[in-house]
Image: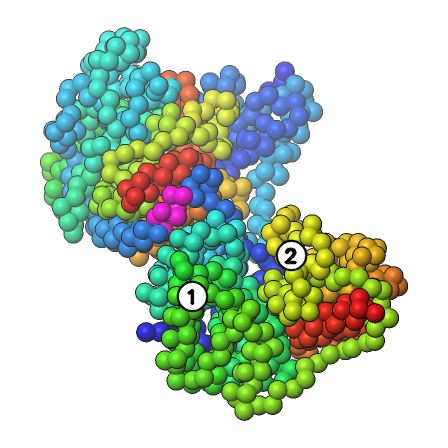
Amino acid sequence: MVSRVEVHPGRYHDSVRLMQASKALQEVAGVTDALVAMATDLNLSLLADMGFDMAAVAAAGPNDLLLAVRAENEDSVGAAIRALDDALAHKAAPAGGLDAPEAKTIGGAADAVDAHIALLSVPGEHAFVEAMEALDTGRHVMIFSDNVPVEHEVTLKRRGVENGLLVMGPDCGTAIVNGVGLGFANAVRPGPVGIVGASGTGIQQITCLLDDAGVGVRHALGTGSHDLSEEVGALSTLQALDALDEDPAVEVISIISKPPAAPVAARVRAAAAECIKPVVITFMGENTLEDGAGEILRALDRPVPSYASWDIDQDDHRPGTVRGLFSGGTLRDEARFVAMPMLGEIGTHEEDSGPTFIDYGDDEYTQGRAHPMIDQTVRIDRLESAAADRSIGVILLDVVLGFGANADPATELAPAILTAREADAAVVVSLCGTARDPQNRDAQAQALRQAGASVWLSNAAAAMEAARLATTRSST
Amino acid sequence: MSDLTQLLDTEPVVATAGTDMLADSLTQQGAAVSRADWRPPHPGTEAALAALAADGRMREANATAIARMLAVRPQLVDVAIAGEVFPDMSERTLFHAGPPVSWDRASGPMRGAIIGAMLYEGLAADPDDAAARAARGEVDLSPCHHHGAVGPMAGVTSPSMPVAVIADGSGDGVSYSTLNEGLGKVLRYGAFAPEVIDRLRWIERVLGPVLSATLRSRGPIDLQSLIAQALQMGDDGHNRNRAVTSLFLREIGAALVDGAAAPTDQRLEVFEFIDSNDHFMLNLVMAAGKLGSDAAAGVTTSSLVTVMARNGTDFGIRLSGTGDEWFTAPAPPVDGLYLGGYTEDDASPDIGDSTITETVGLGGFAMAAAPAIVGFVGGTASGAVRRTLAMYEITLTEHPAYQIPMLEFRGTPTGIDAARVVRTGVQPQINTGVAGKVPGTGMVGAGLVEAPMECFAAAITALAETVR
C-alpha cells in the first residue's frame, strides 16, 4: 500500500467540486482512499481519521488544497493525481439545457401557449381529471377518448354549461373549429353551414358532400356519441345549437345523430324550432346523410348535385352475397339502412351469415392496434378472405380521408382489391374526402378505380350500388 | 344562455394530452399546439383524483391556502429558552425532526442526538446510560412540527436550548427553531462527543443571550427580505446559506458592536462563530418557512403540502386539508457526495425538518439560483435550472419575493400541490445534508433526494375521503 499527501497552497475550490473530485479519485483503479479538500480544521481531522501521515500538512490552512491518496501501488497514485487535474478542470456545461421541460398536465400545456381548447385522447379512465382541469381553467374541451363513465360525462357537461364552455365528447372523433380540424376531419372549404354532430364519420360525410357541392362549413362541433342519451340529455348539443344560432356567419344549422331517445329527440326538436336559423335534423335511420346534405343545400337555395363518383362496370361479377368492411360505425349503419330494403336483414358480426356489414372500428376488432382509419391491416386481411370466399359476390368498404387518417389508404388497399377483382368479386368503395385533404381525394379515387373498384363519394350511393350489384346477379 | 364566442370567433389554440397523432394533424394544419407529456397518475390514486375533481372545491381551497402561506412576514424578534416558550415541554421532553418516532424505531443520528441532548440536560451520566434510559421511555419524544417549531437533521430540541423566535409581521403566528451549531461533529447530525456538548453549553451561555440582547436593541429582522436578497446572491436557502448568513451579520453588525449588554470577548466570539458557519441562517430560514406553512394549514379540501419532514426512519408529509394527520413512507437514501473517506454505506436515510424550505419554494425548488452547489446535480448549471423548472409543474404559484435571476427573475415554484404530484409522477426535489448512520458520527456528506411518492398517494386518498 502506498500513500501520498500533498498540500497545494492557495489553490481554492468550492467544497462541492472538491467532494466530486474526491469521488473521482476514489474511482481510480487501485485507489483505496482519497481525500481532496481545503485544509480546514474539520478536513484535517478527517484526514487524521483516515490514517494519513499528518506531517506534510502541519503548516496547511483553510486556503490551501489538501490531496491525500492511498493506493495499491505508485502507478495508481500517479493516475489518481492526474485524475485530480481532470476533476478540477473547468468543464463547460452542455449547451441548450435551459428549455422548460414539457408540461405533464393539460393545464400546464394550455398555460404554455394560453390555449383555449383542450384536446384529450388519454385513456378514458383518466380523461375526467384532465377535462375538469381544463374546464376549471377556462378551456373548451374535446374528448376523443371513449370509455369515460357516463356520470363523469354528465358532471363535465354540467360544469361546461355553468362555465360557458363547450365539452365535445367523450367519444368525439371529429370537430372543425374555424377551419381547423380536430381529431379526424377533412379539409373542407369555409362557408355558411354550422354543424352539431354526435357522430364523427357522420360529420365527415356531410361536410365532404357539401364541399363537393361547393358549399363550405363554418364550424362542425362534435358532441360525442353519448350526448343524446337520456342520461346526458343533449347538454352539449343544445349548448352548441344555441351558439351556432347566435353566430352571424352561420346561415344554416345541421344536427347529426343516431336516433336519440324519444324525450331527448323531442327536446332537441323543440330547441331547433326556437332557432332563428333553419335547422336540418338528420337522425340516421330516419334518413340518410346524403338526404341531410340535400336538405342543407335546399335551405341555402343551392342546387343538389349528383355527387362525385368514379364508376366502373362490374356487372359480370361472380354471384353471391354482400360483405361490408367498414372503418366508420356511422357509415356502416347508414349503408345497412340504405341496403336493407333491397338485401333484407344484414348481419353486423363476422359470425353472421348472408349479407354482413362489419364495423372494424368497434372495440372488438381494435384490441392492440390503431383504428382501421389509420391501420388497414385487419381490413386488408378480411378483404383477401372475402375474395377467397365464393359465397361472397360483392365487397363494400369505406375509405375515410382527412387529417388524422392513413396517409395513403388506396395504395395499401389496391393489391387486395385487385385480388378480389381477379377472383371476379365486385368491389365498391365509399370514399369520404375532399380535394384538399392531405391524401387528395381524386388521386385516391383514381388509384382505387385502377385496382378495379367503383368509387362513390356518397356512402349511401355506394351502399345502393353494392346492393344493386348483388341483387342483379343473384336474380339472373 | 351560450357564451361560446371565444371558441367560435378565434383561431384555435390547442393544448393536447394523449396520442401524438392528433397533435401532429393540428401542426400539419398550421394551428398553434402545445403538447402535454402526459402519463397516467400514480397507480391507485385514480378514484381519489376523480372524486376531488368532481367535488370541485380543491382549486379554490388551494388558492386560499397558498395566499395564507405567502401573506406571512417572518420577523426574527428574539432568542428565548425552549423550556420557557413551549407550554407542553417538560424537563424530560425532547422535540425531534420529522413525523413521530419512538426510540425503538429511531435512526442512528436520531438516537445519537437524543443521547447528546440527554447528556446536555443532565438526564444521563454517559452515552450508554442515556441510551438505556431513552429505551425505557424516560424521555418524551414529540415532533418539532407539533409545537410550531422546526429543527434541521435530527432536530432535537431540549428545554435548556435557546430558540429563535420568529413572529409574523402581518399576523399572529409565531414559529421557533434552535440555533445552528456549525458543521462537522454536531448534535443535529447525531454526534454527542464532549466537544458537541460544550458547544451547546456555549450556545446557551453566550450565543443565545448575546443575540437576544442584540435583537432587543436593534429591533426585529425581516427574514423574507434577507432570503430574497440571498437567492440573488447564490443561495438556495437549504444547502447553501452563505449569502444569507453574511447578510444577517451585516444586519446585526452595528448593534452587536454597540451592545453594552455583553462583554466584548463574548460579542467577538458570537461574531466569529456566525462568520465561520455558512449554515448559521439555515435554522432561521426554516423557521420562516414554518411560519408560512402553519398559516396555510387547516383549509378544508386543500391539497397544498404544508409539511415535508423526515426523522431518519420515516418521511412524512401533511396537507392543509387533512388536519394533523401524517402520511409517511420509509425515508429514502440520499444521492450524495461524501466527505473524506465516507461512502453511501456510512449514510443514514434522509433526515430533518429542513425540507420545510422546499415546502415554501426554497432549497431544491430554488436550485437554479445557486450555481455554487450545482455539483449536486451532476455539475452543470443547466441541470440545476432544469431541476427548478420541473417543480413549476407541481406547485401552485410563483413566489412573489423569492426570485431567480437566471430565469429572468421568475418567482420560485412555491406551494406543492399533492394532487399534481400524483397526477404527474413528478416528485419534489430536495437538497439536503447526509448524517452518518452510526450514532455519534456526525455529517458524512450532502446531496439530493426525492420525496417518496407513497406519502402523496396516501395523502390524496385521505383528502378524497373528506369530500365523499
> Which secondary structure is most common in the magenta stretch?
helix
Residue under label 2, please give it.
Answer: A348
Percent across and percent down for residue B280 are 30, 37
Front-lying residue, B83 or B187 = B83
Disc 1, SS: helix
Percent across and percent down for residue A230 are 41, 60
Q: Magenta segment, which residues? A: B47-53
Front-lying residue, A386 or B11 = A386
The crowding category of the residue bearing disc 1, from other C-alpha atoms within 10 Å (few below 14, some 14 to 19, many at least 20), is few
Question: At label 2, which amino acid type do we have?
Answer: Thr
A157 sits to left or right of A346: left
Q: Subunit of mark 2?
A: A
Percent across and percent down for residue A36 are 52, 30
Q: Residue at x 25, y 41 (%)?
A: B290
Q: Residue at x 39, y 66 (%)?
A: A263
Residue A457 visible in image:
yes
Residue A176 visible in image:
no
The crowding category of the residue bearing disc 2, from other C-alpha atoms within 10 Å (few below 14, some 14 to 19, many at least 20), is some
Does the magenta portion include B52?
yes
Front-lying residue, A59 or B33 = B33
Does the magenta portion include A372?
no
Q: Is residue B117 above or below residue A320?
A: above
Q: Residue at x 34, y 33 (%)?
A: B327
Distance CA(mark 1)–CA(mark 2): 25 Å
Q: Is residue A294 above or below residue B147?
A: below
Q: Is residue A420 above or below residue B443?
A: below
Residue under label 1, please give it.
Answer: A262
